[in-house]
Image (tube, rainbow, N blue to C red):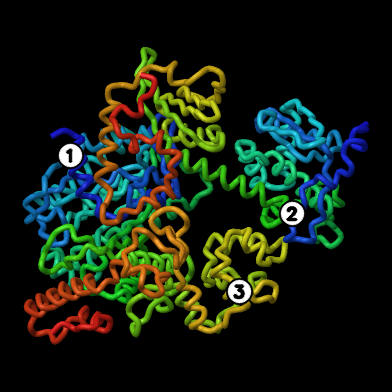
Amino acid sequence: MDTRRSTLAPSAGLTAPAAPTGSPSVAADIYDEVAYAYDGTLEGLLSAIFASYERRERPTDVEPESRLQLRLGQRLARIETNPSHAARVLAGVRRQCGWQAELALKRAACSDEPDAGTAAYRFVRYAVDEQKRRDCEHCRKRLACKGRGGVGPCPRRRGRAFSDITHPAVERLFRISCSVSQECEHMRQFVRFQHLRGEGGDLWFSRVNPKASVVPLVMGHFVERMSDAPFIIYDEVHEVAGVYDGGDWYLVATAGQGDLQQALPAPGADEALMGEAWRTFYRSVAIDARYNPELRRQFMPKRFWKNLTEMQEAPHGLVRGS
Amino acid sequence: MNVVEKLEILADAAKYDVACTSSGVQREGKRGQLGAARQAGCCHSFTPDGRCVTLLKVLMTNVCVYDCCYCVNRKSNGEMRRAAFTPRELADLTIGFYRRNYIEGLFLSSGVTGSPDATCESMVEALRILREEYGFRGYIHAKAIPGASVELLDALGRLADRLSVNLELPSGQSLGLLAPDKSRHSILAPMRHIHDSIAEDAESRSLARKRTTVYMTKKPARKAQAFAPAGQSTQMIIGATPESDFQILNLSASLYTQLSLKRVFFSAYLPAVAHPLLPATDAVQLNREHRLYQADWLMRFYGFDVSEIIDEANPFLEPDVDPKANWALNHLDFFPVEVNTAPLEALLRVPGIGVRGAKLILRARRQSTLGEMELRKLGIAYKRARYFITMNGAWGGSGVDFSRDALHARLAAPIPGGRHGRRADKTAPGQMSLFESATEAALPGTGAPAALPEASAANRAALDAAFAAQRAALEAASPAKPQPIAARAHNRATAQPAA
């Protein structure tokens, strides 16, 4: 089937990334000279993982098509997103690797890191192989176990693969998951809503610039606490908006539509007053004798400042396009 | 005066209150109502001094009938602008800020106007508007006013998530001297009452949950609001009076055990107002405050007893190594600890391994044997921990003498300040600079870190003068007493005992 591999790539093992030297017990995986491109969504990533099993291939890279750069002599395979395949993979990961691994996959799909998809794919390969390698011989529960003899997942090993953080196949996913979770926390902290007043009614609008596409992960948090008014969280980096209409929330892609705020009504009269009150408060709670700007920058990185009300100089600094 | 001006005055007056936490209570949101609270809390902004802003921290009013000499809002401070919020203004401001995700809730304190009861009543009214009229489900922290009646305290506790009473100063004597209108009893009585009410509330809840019949019982239509579900906290000023760290830590340990406080906050003394009894120095004792917080964390999360951290013979914490490293240096017989087998309690004693690191080690070592590479991947401070651990039998600190002095030198070495910011090493040692003064450049051993301002001789002298004045005032007040306790404990550390 794959005749090009023998001619173009001298040996699949040569271009595969070297296994880290720290743990010699880990056998290096042999990767095929193929890169999977998916559409950048969680479903796309899971479909790509499904495809690698279906096509019996071990892709070197699994990346969103927009970010993918082929290596020398690498073949490209575009993977169609298939929701039913994605659901099967997600259910399988939950069953075999536990809910923490499932959450980590969801977070990795939101990450902007170039190797996030590859890390997720490698982890799933590793975790599923670990399940298969187990020995039920000495297990006390083997008679009552549904997965005995390796036919199904072992309930006792469910969370184990993901807790082996030092393993090279797990470490990268763990790191990515941590950094996306950190970015979610930054969003919960630094989202600032503006009150827009249009003919249709009130709307709360917020503009954010996270370094991972975390709006779908934090919408639940804001819907829980602001459920009595519609709001929009607009991610200007990834051109995605989370829209809550008072009943349910949706994710809207705004790519190619220009700045979302141009299409929205102007801020209400109370907005300037409240912004000024907040800036006044922020100024007056600072204690000069303890001045420590490095500490502030550590907790509140400068990349967020342009969308923070309290870091704006002029009263109307936050209002753009008006 | 408009709301923004009032906010400026009243937030400025409240900025010395250190407790700004929104943690300790988990309350899910309700459809159609504003707000929810998370167990871990959430910081929404950070001031230029790096402290977090999580709550709208304001005073109801900064008019006060008391005359505590360390406080900016005291009665005799003539140049202070005074203002007061009406309950409605404050509630509207809180809602407006919360909607914009500026804050996690409200932190309400107040100066005492008229009587403590009247002050407390207006606070209760503001919280009632928030909770009942606006249906606000966010976090509320309220300061209990010492001297207010028990009924008002109960009403406050039902509306707020956390209550706190300021301990102000670490001993009754200092309190009597610097805050003549307050007494030990007037502060401890409300704390004890809050503790009893929280315990009673929890107990009646657990009894109500118990099923006593086989019949299904009808649930009440509306849940009663719990009494201060996030517990109570307190704070005290450090460095205005001569109490030692030994006294302060023992006091906070007894507050944790006897009154089940969630937090005891320390606030390094800042000269906000000039007074003959107060130290006139600009050097804030930030390092001391930091060490006290480290010791506080050891007591609350690392399973240390207060007697392990500090004893009466050395009543002040070491300035150059942290309390945990100090304990390790004094108990070298406990080390090295084998990371692959040691229990959690032993791992928590190792300098460089924190609670998160210890838990990650437990999690990772079920799968693989941990060595240096793995420990570094887990993100523990290997540089510090390596002298105190073995990894599968191999000691990490080879090349260093396993003795107290050698390890002390390693742990007390200044941490490189990075390449940016104030602590950065701008010049390499020995490098010539255009802007350095000649005398400084000529000094040998310029690689040593600059002394902290709080350790300077001028600062020490200012502190000693103030403490001597305090002692003199105490002796004048009670000539029968031979020597005050606070003075006795302090004299060991000061070079010049006051005559």
Q: Residues within 10 Å of mark 3 (few under 14, many from 20)?
A: many
Name the side, left or right, on which B343 lies relative to B275.
right
CB atoms at circles 3 and 1 under 8 Å apart?
no
Chain ID, mark 3: B
Label of residue A157 in the image: 2
Give whichever of A13, A26 is nearer the camera.
Answer: A13
Q: Residues within 10 Å of mark 2 (few under 14, many from 20)?
A: some
Name the side, left or right, on which B492 lies relative to B322.
left
SS of the residue under disc 2? helix
Residue B224, visible in the rendered structure: no
The residue to which callout 1 is attached is B6
Q: Nearer the viewer, mark 1 or mark 2?
A: 1
- Position of B158 relative to A193 (above/below): below
Q: What residue is shown at x 31% (from left), y 54% (from top)?
A: B19
Q: Position of residue B126 (x, y in %)?
A: 23, 40
Query: Mark 1 or mark 3, which is nearer the start of the sequence?
Result: 1
Name of the residue lying farthest toward the top: A199
